Image: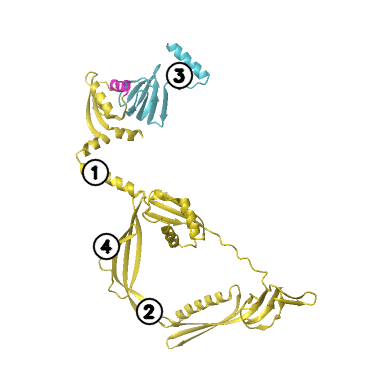
């Protein structure tokens, strides 16, 4: 701090020629002249830093007190100001740059959204834009609380939102509402039907009148447990039938794939196009936007420009890279094709049976007219009961 | 006068009163290369191998090699260099 203050006041490196250095030092102390960085040369002379004002006092004291002072170097703000005195344009440019930097930092040029898991960032950004908060908004005009309330009305999935502005950067923090758990309806009269065909292996009825027994073969949609109870004492009444019915089911799934497939072979030819997005407006650095190649991959990379201190600039650098390729028809091995098809079929079966288990699997593979067909035969054990309301 | 000061210093020591409160010199040595003196009375001798500091009742002689009086104000001073010996005279 003291060093910065001294630099602001101006610093002089001084060489002192004296017979008795201790006398000079004591003279400095008695006249309240501070110094630092003192070194004694082999020739007996002293060198030290003094402030500009102290150097002037020293000059007045020299001679009659038996020492001489010589200025070696001057530095600090007064020296710089003196140098810049005749460079009007440079000073004006410097001031203009400082002013522009200061002014631009008052506007929002970088918006970062955090905390969203299901609500997409684009939806949040679009709604913020509709409320007048977007790139280029004057930072001090943003009312975080008001914005939060209006955003919660616009996007009901949000439970909380805060906008923190630091310079030209805005951090939009959101919290999403936890969805209400689905409460099963157990009051509406309902019956239990089979969602798949199969042979019942286990049946446990929680409510309702069972219509089938273990070992029975049922079709998809067939009534398993009725929601209408009839008794002599209470007469006919409707209940919400519930049951867990486990059954053996059978699947036959097929998938096909041609033996010949098309793959990309990159030629090594590459084109790049650059553009910048300034405050939401795109400026292209190319005239012809079309690409003459018929087959190419397009890779777009965007990078926000920022100063080394972390200050974001309202500029996004866009680079589009085009990699040319030629489609090549190749013949893949039958084993590889079958493996790919089998993996796909296993996934389909897993999706179909849900929590059920596979008890037996058989495969069949054939090739006809350049097309490989793989068929999966599976026997499974799974829940087939589903409650449907009584109309 | 010196006797009175000495008596005052002894009394301060007995009653655990810090010497700084009575205007006594405070000397701080950091390692063997920095010596900081507060409330000195001036420099009596200045050289690369010996710096003598007036501490009031005593003179503090700092011996060493490549000694430098890095900074000094009317109350404080800082000596750096390879300090080999300190002596009250």
Magenta segment main secondary structure: helix
Circles 2 and 3: CB distance less than 8 Å?
no
* Pointer 1 and pointer 3 on the same chain: no
Which circle, 1 or 3, is nearer the viewer? 1
Q: Which mark is residue A285?
A: 4
Specify the farthest residue to the left: A86
Q: Earlier in the sequence, mark 4 or mark 1?
A: 1
In 3D space, how far apart are the residues under numbered discs 2 and 1 (Cα atoms)? 64 Å
- The stretch in magenta equals A23-32
Which chain is yellow in the rendering?
A: A
Asked if residue A310 lies in the magenta stretch, the reply is: no
Circles 2 and 1: CB distance less than 8 Å?
no
* Pointer 4 and pointer 1 on the same chain: yes
In 3D space, how far apart are the residues under numbered discs 4 and 1 (Cα atoms)? 31 Å
In 3D space, how far apart are the residues under numbered discs 4 and 3 (Cα atoms)? 77 Å
**Chain B, hue in figure:** cyan
Q: Which mark is residue A300?
A: none
In 3D space, how far apart are the residues under numbered discs 2 and 3 (Cα atoms)? 96 Å
* Pointer 2 and pointer 4 on the same chain: yes
Residue that mark 3 sits on:
B22
């Amino acid at each position: 701090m003291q060093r910065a203050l001294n630099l602001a006041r101006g610093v002089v490196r001084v060489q002192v020629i004296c017979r008795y250095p201790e006398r000079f030092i004591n003279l400095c102390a008695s006249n309240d002249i501070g110094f630092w960085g003192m070194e004694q040369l082999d020739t007996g002379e002293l060198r030290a830093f003094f402030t500009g004002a102290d150097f002037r006092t020293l000059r007045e004291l020299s001679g009659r007190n038996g020492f001489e002072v010589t200025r070696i170097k001057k530095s600090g703000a007064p020296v710089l100001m003196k140098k810049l005195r005749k460079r009007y344009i440079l000073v004006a440019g410097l001031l203009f740059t400082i002013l522009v930097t200061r002014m631009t930092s008052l506007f929002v040029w970088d918006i970062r959204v955090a905390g969203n898991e299901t609500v997409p960032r684009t939806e949040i950004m679009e709604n913020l834009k509709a409320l007048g908060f977007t790139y280029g908004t004057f930072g001090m005009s943003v009312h975080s609380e008001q914005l939060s309330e209006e955003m919660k009305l616009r996007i009901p999935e949000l439970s909380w939102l805060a906008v923190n502005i630091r310079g030209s950067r805005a951090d939009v923090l959101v919290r999403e509402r936890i969805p209400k758990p689905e409460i099963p309806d157990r009051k509406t009269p309902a019956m239990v039907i089979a969602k798949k065909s199969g042979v019942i292996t286990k049946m446990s009825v929680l409510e309702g009148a069972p219509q089938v027994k273990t070992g029975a073969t049922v079709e998809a949609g067939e009534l398993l447990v009725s929601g209408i109870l009839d008794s002599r004492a209470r007469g006919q009444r409707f209940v919400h039938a519930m049951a867990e019915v486990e059954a053996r089911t059978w699947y036959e799934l097929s998938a096909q794939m041609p033996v010949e497939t098309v793959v990309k072979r990159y030629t090594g030819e590459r084109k790049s196009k650059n553009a910048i997005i300034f405050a939401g407006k795109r400026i292209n650095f190319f005239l012809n936007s079309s690409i003459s190649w018929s087959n190419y991959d397009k890779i777009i990379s965007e990078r926000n420009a920022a100063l080394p201190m972390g200050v974001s600039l309202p500029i996004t650098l866009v680079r589009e890279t085009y990699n040319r390729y030629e489609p090549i028809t190749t013949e893949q091995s039958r084993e590889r094709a079958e493996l790919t098809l089998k993996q796909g079929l296993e996934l389909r079966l897993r999706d179909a049976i849900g929590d059920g288990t596979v008890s037996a699997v058989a495969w069949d593979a054939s090739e006809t007219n350049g097309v490989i067909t793989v068929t999966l035969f599976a026997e499974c054990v799974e829940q087939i009961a589903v409650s449907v309301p009584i109309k | 006068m010196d006797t009175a000061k000495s008596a005052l210093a002894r009394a301060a020591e007995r009653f655990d009163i810090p010497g700084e409160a009575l205007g006594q010199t405070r000397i701080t040595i950091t390692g063997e290369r920095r010596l900081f003196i507060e409330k000195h009375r001036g420099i009596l001798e200045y050289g690369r191998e010996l710096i003598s500091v007036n501490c009031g009742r005593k003179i503090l002689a700092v011996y060493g090699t490549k000694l430098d009086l890095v900074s000094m104000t009317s109350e404080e001073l800082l000596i750096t260099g390879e300090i080999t010996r300190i002596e009250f005279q």
